[in-house]
Image (spheres, helix red, strand yellow):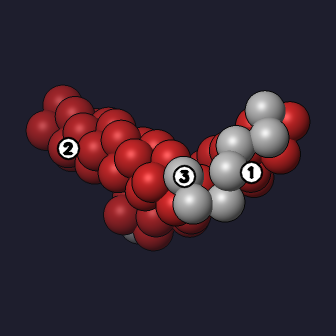
């Protein structure tokens, strides 16, 4: 049950972060060729954050 909640939260959170990243790229007029690197970096960092959150919750409960 906890895994399902974390996965749903993570999908929603990643979607929101990607939406905000896209808005940032549009506002700062970042060139198209640099945008995939920015998205990849942010997604990897957020995924690490979410996995560490999940592990912390699992091992503290």
Point out residue 3 in the picture as x, y percentages from the top left corner.
36, 63
Relative horizontal placement of residue 26, taking residue 36 as reference (left or right): right
Q: CA distance from mark 1 to mark 3?
A: 12 Å
Q: Is residue 10 visible?
A: no
Q: Are marks 1 and 2 in contact (CB under 8 Å)?
A: no
Relative horizontal placement of residue 47, taking residue 36 as reference (left or right): left
Residue, x 13% and y 38% (percent of image)? 59
Relative horizontal placement of residue 28, taking residue 50 as reference (left or right): right
> Front-most of 50 and 17?
17
Residue, x 24% and y 39% (percent of image)? 52
Q: Residues within 10 Å of mark 3 (few under 14, many from 20)?
A: few
Which residue is identified by label 1? 22
Res 60 → quadrant? top left
Q: CA distance from mark 1 to mark 2?
A: 29 Å
Which residue is identified by label 2? 55
Question: Mark 2 falls on what kind of element?
Answer: helix
Q: Is residue 38 visible?
A: yes
Q: Quadrant of the C terminus?
A: top left
* Residue 40 versus residue 28 in the image, above or below: below
Point out residue 21 in the picture as x, y percentages from the top left corner.
68, 44
């Amino acid at each position: 049950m906890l895994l399902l909640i974390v996965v749903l939260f993570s999908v929603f959170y990643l979607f929101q972060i990607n939406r905000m990243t896209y808005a940032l790229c549009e506002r700062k007029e970042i060139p198209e060729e640099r945008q995939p690197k920015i998205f990849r970096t942010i997604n990897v960092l957020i995924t690490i954050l979410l996995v560490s959150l999940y592990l912390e919750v699992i091992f503290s409960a």
